[in-house]
Amino acid sequence: MKTVWLTSIIPSEERVKNLIVQLKPYGLDVKGHFWEDEISKMAWAKPREELIKPEISLWLILASNENLKSPSVRYGLSLLCLTLQAQKGISFPVVILLAEGEMLSAETLPTPLKGCDLLSMTDPGMAAKLVVKANAPVKEIVSEYRLDTYGNPHIGQWVEVGPCNGSWPGAMFGVAGAEIAFHAVGPKGSLPTQSSLRYPLKGIKLNLGGKEYIAWAVQNEIPSDISYFVKLEGFPESILFGPYATEEEADVFVVQLK
């Protein structure tokens, strides 16, 4: 039996129970939680440890069309999806199950969710399609970068970036619609307890796609086992990051979060 983690943004116990009953005959064991739309308290991070467990083979998000238009819901789902992808691979299956409203296009969703599948609760083949997704082997896709998120009321919001292979001659990170409060460099996988920064920079203004980003940077070498960490204040609409560059034009990665 495959185990599915269900995130229900719709606060209806009856609807969730009916869904679990529908999926059980298909060999899907459902665990999960009800979404808390409180990004100021980093509530999006609460299910992280359960979601990334090895036995979880699919992340199922039960939502309405209106739920997915909410900037705070989109932001929280994006950060949770990023940390899931960091731990289980960017091709780990994520399915949005629409309980209400017209079918959306994945292209209208934030960057971390663009690769998900969308299904309707009224689709007669819904359960069978979920079984296929849960049992399909996950294809390993190698990204050019590593991107992870951390969050709780005690440490705040942090983002970790670095190269998957090779090395960066420093790192840069920018936010649109928020601020950076702190930055550090350390071993990948956990927030550093101490850090020494080489030529740190703050308040770099960048314009990209009609948005203004405020970026910080360091010139520490960032190999594949070292990361650049930034602490966020506020809830950015989008982020950009990449290797530090002295030229006016630089290669950066952009991730929309709302």
Image (tube, helix red, strand yellow):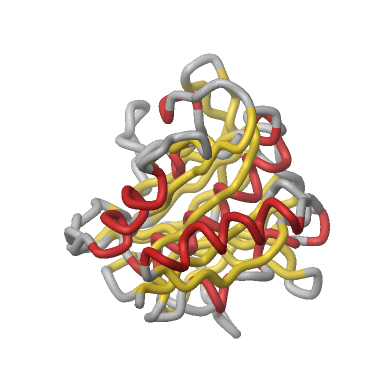
Residue beneath the point at 37% across and 64% down:
26
Q: Is residue 76 left or right of residue 136?
A: right
Residue 150 seen in the figure: yes
x and y, in percent, of residue 93 in the image: 35, 55
Residue 254 seen in the figure: no
x and y, in percent, of residue 190 in the image: 51, 79
Above or below, 20 against 121 in this view is below
Residue placed farthest to the top in the image?
210
Front-lying residue, 124 or 68: 124
Residue placed farthest to the bottom in the image?
193
Above or below, 193 against 39 in this view is below
Front-lying residue, 219 or 64: 64
Q: Quadrant of the N terminus?
A: bottom left
Q: Is residue 59 left or right of residue 102?
A: left
Q: Is residue 17 left or right of residue 140?
A: right
| Quadrant in the rendering for residue 124 | top left
Above or below, 81 against 226 in this view is above
